[in-house]
Image: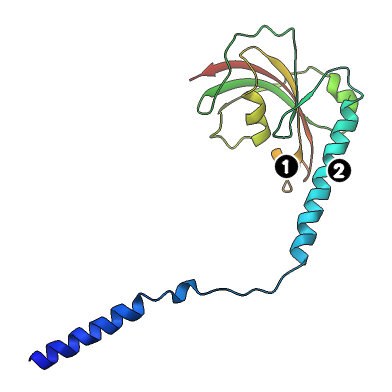
Amino acid sequence: MIFQMSRISIFLFIIVLFSCTKRYQSRVMHEYDASKDVFIEANRTIIQNEENKIDSMLTQSTNFFIKDSSGIRLFIDPYSQEIDNKPKDGDNVLVAYNCVLFEDHNLINDDILIDTISFQIGYSKQMRGLNYAIKRMKTGDKAKIVIPSYLGFGMSGYGKIVPPYSTLLLNVQLLKIKE
């Protein structure tokens, strides 16, 4: 009986010893794949070309657009009737807007607001660029926002309405903030 208990103990010790080895963490050796660099460089080129196109078109505008660190360009109408509060992540906002493809510099001067949308800042499936811009506005502000494709609908686009890699121009007015 003691001999059998001793064999079981030795058996359990061996199982525990081998189960504690770090075989799952062994070093993985991969060959270097230069094709990945090609894709990274292609994306950088696409983004840089889009940035140059946006900046070039905005030089033809009479409005002074500020480039945010996120990459959006924002012009807030200085004559807006704003109330001194800005939305923050988690706030629900009501926004009047019009969204067009940013392909013609003449569109920058349009001030048409067509529809309204309500969403929660930082938690909605709205474009990241729109979330960034709305957080810079106060209630009542009217603004023009240029959203690069990487902060808009990206390489997938939005159905048949917005092609892939499209830069967007939004005319917006922040109507209401509900905390």
On the image, numbered disc 2 is attached to which residue?
49
Residue at 80% x, 22% y: name it.
Answer: 65
Which structural element holds mark 2? helix
* Three-letter amino acid code of the residue under disc 2: Asn
Number of dots carrying numbers: 2
Q: Looking at the picture, how far across and down is residue 24, in whole percent?
A: 46, 73
Residue at 19% x, 84% y: name it.
Answer: 9
Dot 2 crowding, Cα within 10 Å, few <14, some 14–19, many 20+? few
Vertically, is 54 above or below 107?
below
Asked whether the residues under the numbered discs 1 and 2 touch, taking CB atoms below 8 Å apart as contact, a structural biologist would say: no
Quarter containing the N terminus:
bottom left
Vertically, is 173 above or below 67?
above
Q: Looking at the picture, how far across and down is residue 55, in whole percent?
A: 86, 31
On the image, numbered disc 1 is attached to which residue?
150
Dot 1 crowding, Cα within 10 Å, few <14, some 14–19, many 20+? many
Residue that extends furthest to the left in the rendered view of this protein: 1
